[in-house]
Image (tube, helix red, strand yellow):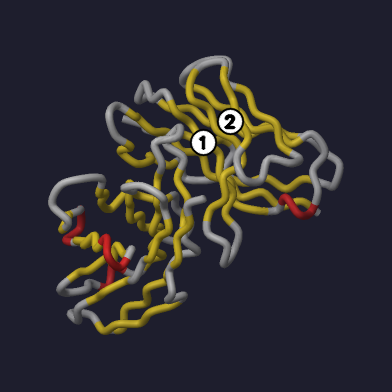
Amino acid sequence: NAGVTQTPKFRVLKTGQSMTLLCAQDMNHEYMYWYRQDPGMGLRLIHYSVGEGTTAKGEVPDGYNVSRLKKQNFLLGLESAAPSQTSVYFCASSYLGQANYGYTFGSGTRLTVV
Amino acid sequence: AQSVTQPDIHITVSEGASLELRCNYSYGATPYLFWYVQSPGQGLQLLLKYFSGDTLVQGIKGFEAEFKRSQSSFNLRKPSVHWSDAAEYFCAVGAGDAGKSTFGDGTTLTVKP
């Protein structure tokens, strides 16, 4: 009964380094999302996916890329990390039948770029 | 574009007292509305949701919220707060467009003994 699992939980990167954050869900949800959370700014949508093989940009996509090769996994990549990408990253998934039922969130990845 | 405003950044209540957290939204059609709770170092957990029907919705942990279309509000309430309710609370409005949700900036709840 794992729900949404994010790895890693913590990471420190140097400016210019790259990394991939992994999100895995076992609920057979079609929709998956990546958000970043910064103090006093709520959550902002980076990218999202409405199904396997599809991705789309959210509110703050610059500097990030995503892939959804398998339905259960949604990867967020930083090609060249910048200090402005220091944040807590949350993955979420959702089932949309005839309504929006809300999100199931992972526990987050705390990323520091120095 | 949809938006959410949570007017109160920080609220302090005494244990056992009642609680109301405010949320105002902007959305062109009938919205999907949500309240989430985030404990320190954790992800967000869905407390309750509204998308149609009865405007007073019940959620987990004894919370309820009332949708008022005329005021564009979806305030969260609890009759008697427990120390374990101390957390950050987020209101969100969701669209039918890929289910994307827009979140408010959050309200931090502190519970005094």
Residue under the image location 61 percent in, 41 percent down: A46
Amino acid on which the number 2 mark rests in the picture: Leu
Label 2 crowd (10 A; few <14 / some 14-19 / many >=20)? some
Residue B89, given in percent of the width and then of the height, sits at 38, 63
Q: Earlier in the sequence, mark 1 or mark 2?
A: 2
> Which residue appears at 53% of the width and 31% of the height?
A23
Q: Which residue is mark 1?
A: A33
Q: Quadrant of the C terminus of chain B?
A: bottom left
Left or right of residue A94: residue B49: left
In the image, residue A56 lies at what x, y percent?
Answer: 60, 29
Q: Chain of mark 1?
A: A
Question: Which amino acid, by three-letter code, is at mark 1?
Answer: Tyr
From this view, report whether residue B99 is shown above or below residue B104.
Answer: above
Residue at 53% from the left image edge and 53% from the top image edge: A43
**In this rendering, would A20 be left or right of B70?**
right
Q: Secondary structure at mark 1?
A: strand
- How far apart marks 1 and 2 lie (CA) works out to 12 Å
Q: Secondary structure at mark 2?
A: strand
To the question of a shared chain for discs 1 and 2, the answer is yes
How packed is label 1: few (under 14 Cα within 10 Å), some, or many (20 or more)? many
- Residue marked by disc 2: A22
Chain where mark 2 sits? A
Left or right, B36 with reference to B49: right
- Image spot of residue B59 (x, y percent): 20, 53
Left or right for A19, reference A67:
right
Looking at this view, name the residue that lies furthest to the right: A16
Residue B105 x, y percent position in the rendering:
50, 64
What residue sits 15% from the left and 73% below the top?
Answer: B79
Which of A111 and A101 lies nearest the eye of the viewer? A101
